[in-house]
Image (cartoon, rainbow, N blue to C red):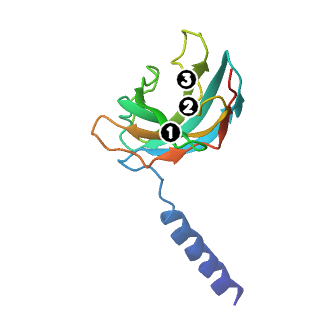
């Protein structure tokens, strides 16, 4: 009886290991890792951390970013953010993409405009989508709420 249970366990373990497939697909996959800070004052920078996976590793094309202001219904920009140049092109690739914006006169990063809501703070979210060299586009992911403090 013990031998039958042992054989059953070995077969079940083998089946489970055979079914363990990687999660890499030809369409890039994005997940939100973090953002800092979530309350942004003038002359500060904000950094978003995203994780990606891609079967072919050809994500060196474009990442789209859109800022949507929730409290006054404005969409300030939708733009292609330059992809990092150090992303290796290898199959079954995964990694992190850091996207930084400045809220003020910091020329090192693209700028976020003044709050869209006249005379008040913006409550907004940022949306991201990644397109690879084969024109496969990931699902859109959304950041947590960010507050831009009015100057």
Left/right placement of residue 68 relative to residue 42 reads: left
Residue assigned mark 3: 112
Element under label 1?
strand
Q: Is residue 42 above or below residue 123?
A: above
Q: Is residue 26 above or below residue 101?
A: below
Residue assigned mark 2: 116
- Which numbered mark, 3 or 2, is in the foreground of this view? 2
Query: In terms of image quadrants, where is residue 41?
Result: top right
Label 3 crowd bin: few (<14), some (14–19), many (20+), radius 10 Å: some
Of 11 and 3, the residue lying toward us? 11
Between marks 3 and 2, how big is the CA–CA gap? Answer: 10 Å
Q: Is residue 99 above or below residue 10?
A: above
Asked if the residues shown at circle 2 and circle 1 are in contact, with their CB atoms under 8 angstroms apart, the answer is yes
Between marks 2 and 1, how big is the CA–CA gap? Answer: 7 Å
In the picture, which quadrant includes the N terminus?
bottom right
Residue assigned mark 1: 74
Element under label 2?
loop
In the picture, which quadrant includes the C terminus?
top right
């Amino acid at each position: 009886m013990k031998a039958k249970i042992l054989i059953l366990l070995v077969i079940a373990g083998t089946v489970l290991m055979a079914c363990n497939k990687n999660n890499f697909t030809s369409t890039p996959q994005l997940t939100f890792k973090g953002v800092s800070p979530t309350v942004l004052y003038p002359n500060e920078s904000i950094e978003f951390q995203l994780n990606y996976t891609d079967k072919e590793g050809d994500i060196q094309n474009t990442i789209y970013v859109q800022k949507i202001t929730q409290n006054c219904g404005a969409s300030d920009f939708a733009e292609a953010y330059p992809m990092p140049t150090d992303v290796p092109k290898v199959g079954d690739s995964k990694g992190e993409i850091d996207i930084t914006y400045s809220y003020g006169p910091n020329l090192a990063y693209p700028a976020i405009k003044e709050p869209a809501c006249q005379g008040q703070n913006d409550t907004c979210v940022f949306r991201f989508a990644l397109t690879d060299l084969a024109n496969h586009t990931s699902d859109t992911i959304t950041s947590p709420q960010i507050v831009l403090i009015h100057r």
